[in-house]
Amino acid sequence: MTDATPPLVLLVEDEPQMRRFLRVALEGSGHRFLEAATAQEGLLLAASHRPMVILLDLGLPDMDGLELTRRLRDWCATPIIVISARGQEADKIGALDAGADDYLTKPFSTGELLARIRVALRHERGEGSPEEPVFHLGPWRVDLARRQVFVRNEEVHLTPLEYKLFTTLIRHAGKVVTHQQLLREVWGGVPGAQPLYLRVYMTQLRHKLEEDPSRPRYLQTEPGVGYRLRTED
């Protein structure tokens, strides 16, 4: 995207009046604007249009905004600003822990929102473009927006924890990810979580995804350290 192209902002918000208000405010300040009334529509627009900033309400009709934030973070590095009437500290902490970059409590001024968007755009431009929503490696194709995994064009069902472990390795593809980092990112630091969990779930992933689970080509063990998703064929 060149500097002359107005930044594209995606709003995921179910209140029509708020959508109209923000459309006028953002288009009037030189932004391009997309809107979605549901979480599923927001996911599809995020994957197909690649916005530079996402504004996200937590109270959506088909999915809680925290879950939508987590799903976006499976594949998307785009800055997310939560705009919500929930103003308790716990709500803000929950949104930030789920992967949001900023939190703005309703009602808010147009000036403050535009300032937060400018900060988000600076960060986005500094970090480069978002990741592709479809990940390809060898016989694998992973549609990260739709949470679908294919091996040689055949869909493979992964449990929620298997999928979270797999996509965590995808986010760090080519790098060694330590046991503690995986336990923190996949299990959220749950007391009692230990490397044994990783061995069990990694074995399950290899049986579902690798051609020879006993000699895995891509899901590599780094002895005593962690695991690595090998990206070179």
Image: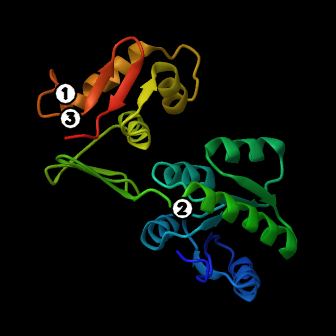
Amino acid tagged 3: Lys
Judged from the image, the secondary structure of the residue bearing numbered disc 2 is loop
Q: Which mark is residue 62?
A: 2
Question: From the image, which quarter does the C terminus lie in?
Answer: top left
How far is the residue under mark 1 from the one under mark 2?
A: 39 Å
What amino acid is at disc 1? Pro
Q: Provide the residue designation for mark 1.
A: 216
> 209 above or below 11?
above
Q: Secondary structure at mark 1?
A: loop
| Quarter where residue 98 is shown | top right
| The one of 108 and 122 positioned closer to us in this rendering | 122
Residue type, mark 2 in image: Asp
In what element is the residue under mark 3? Answer: helix
Mark 1 or mark 3, whichever is nearer to me = 1
Q: Which residue is mark 3?
A: 208
State the residue at coordinates (43%, 15%).
Answer: 195
CA neighbours of label 2 inside 10 A, class few (<14), some (14 to 19), many (20+)? few
Using the numbered discs, state the Cα–Cα distance from disc 1 to disc 3 in whole angstroms.
11 Å
Q: Is residue 22 left or right of residue 77?
A: right
Q: Position of residue 23 (x, y in %)?
A: 69, 83
Q: Is residue 206 above or below residue 23?
A: above
Q: Earlier in the sequence, mark 2 or mark 3?
A: 2
Mark 1 or 3, nearer chain start: 3
Q: Decide: is 58 above or below 186.
A: below
* Distance from Cα at disc 2 to Cα at disc 3: 30 Å
